[in-house]
Image: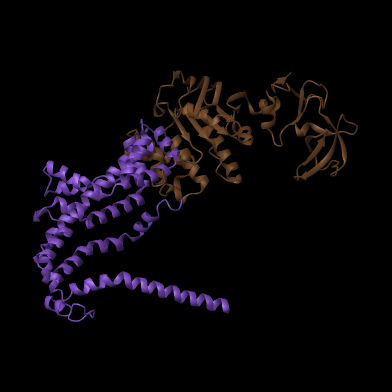
Amino acid sequence: MAQVRLDHISKTFASGDDQVRAVDDVTLDIEHHEFMILLGPSGCGKSTLLRVVAGLEDPTAGDVYIGDRRVNDVVPKERDIAMAFQRYALYPHKTVAANIEFPLKVRGVGRAERAAEALRAAEVLGLEHHMKRKPGQLSGGQRQRVALARAIVRNPAVFLMDEPLSNLDAKLRGDTRAELVDLHRRIDSTFIYVTHDPVEAMTMGSRVAVLNEGRLQQVGTPQEVYDRPATAFVAQFIGTPPMNLLPAGLWGSDTVQVGIRPEHLRLVPGGPLHAVVRQVEHLGHEVLLFADANGTRLVSRIDPNSFVPEVGDPVAFDAEPGRLHRFHPESGERIE
Amino acid sequence: MAADTVRGVRKVGRYTLLVVLAVIVLFPIYAVVLQALKTGPDSLDHPRSLLPVDLTLSTIKAAWTQGNLGRLLMNSVFVSVMVTLGVVLTSLLAAYAFAFLQFPLKGPIFVLFLATMLVPAEVTVVINERTADSLGWINSYQGLIVPSLASTFGIFLVRQVFLQLPGELREAAALDGVGHVRFLWEVAAPLSRPTLGALGLFTFLGTWNAYLWPSQVIRGDRAHETVQIGLERLKNNDISKINLVTGGLVVAALPIFIMLVLFQRQLVRGLTAGAVKG
């Protein structure tokens, strides 16, 4: 059983005389065989947190547990983890087979057993026909699969991934996303996956932990995080286009910020929110309507078969009942 | 049309310049080879004759036997190979420490290393010779080899290559349980092979051609003479046999020439290393 527990983790980097707090008092419990996504914009501390789990960084404060063992003082190789890096980190002078076998070779596994294990891992990722090639002869997607095979060949309890898809093109990213979800189903490891891409988080994770400026904002299933964002930051970070956030006083109460997802902001003649259409984007299956309400930019997602106003038209919006989110105007925290 | 003509004239001018430069560079080599291929009386009677007439290998044969060239070449090969291996090894180890390890005063120590490049070899030759003398290394292989076993330039060069290796490689290796020695031999060194090749080649050439230090540490002991020292002795013994010296020069330059032809690509790559970021 490999649950991972992060207990009040902080990590501070000294840069000259400045102290940069990359991770700020994060507590997070990750269940056995969970696919946990650490999501946030660049610089939010998600990669640092992953590296703390890996043992590549020591936490400034707090404890890391893998299984029931506190691993703060355990070197990376003894943590029973494997990691896939953004830039693959393959050994360019070794063949695919040698790359995948390498962790076993280091552990002193015999040649025959090594080859068999490597082939098994390669088959899981569809690499068995590329074993004699060097990484330079492979496409980006294939290289990333080699990196994943090198990680799973060790049969790790915890599998860490640091933005493994960010160097791939859009199509390949989609395919590999599905492969990773499939891989997670087939092996018994706990996955911790770092990304800045909300789409990856929504489609892959069993749970998502959203971070901003080193602080944990919210943990929940993708749907929970989408439906009930805990802060205005989460509300805006997850979802494309992001949630409309209206300053206090524009709609209803003078003391709360109001959030409405674009798909819940409907054109209603005589509705309470008046605006002027600034831009219309036809995407085929939907139309994105960008409008200006007293200096606040709004976006609404509407059906292309319904009435679509033109640029310059005055329009009125209303929200679907029960779909308004309220946030504290200073702290940004959700108000029920 | 006009543009074509200008381009044509430029091309002719460029090639003319290159041909002139090539002649200037190649002429001394031609003169030496020619003299080495003439008999003794011939080269003295017509010292300035540049025509390749009455060529013979007898001078080279004489140089080989009278100059004891076999022994000289063997000494030079042995010393050059040992120094080359030593420099590559020490450069790898020191560069690894400077690139991948953390230790106190790392920056200042590295600057100190670099500062030694500012001191010309001529300045240190006397004190080094005294040290060799006190160690009993005069007229010995260790006297020829040991003082050259580490090269600041080599350490600097290899360190630069190591620093360009992605940090993720070291981290991935650490997660796999790879220690420093294994990472050096299995990852860092193989990935630096072009640079190591160029470093080895430069070191070999430099050691082969070295004169100053061997002339200090070898004092008349023929058993340990390198080829450059031996040729100098040959010249000083009998100036009338100058063609024997040129014959010896040709033989001594032959291994270098072969290496240059074989490793030309590495040499160029070594010279341009770091000039263009890959």
Q: Which residue is more in the foreground, B260 or A77?
A: B260
Residue at left offset 87%, top offset 37%: A315
Tell me where residue A236 sits by quadrant.
Answer: top right
Hey, which residue is sitting farthest right in the picture? A270
On the image, the x and y values in percent for residue A309 come to 86, 42
State the residue at coordinates (75%, 43%): A285
Q: Position of residue A42 (x, y in %)?
A: 58, 34
Q: Is residue B245 above or below residue A243?
A: below
Q: Position of residue A173 (x, y in %)?
A: 58, 42
Q: Nearer the viewer, residue B23 or A6?
A: B23
Compared across the picture, whether A115 is left or right of A34 comes to: left
The spot of residue A184 in percent (x, y) is 53, 32
Q: Quadrant of residue A305?
A: top right
Q: Which chain is purple?
A: B
Chain in brown (letter): A
On the picture, is B270 further left or further right than A208? left
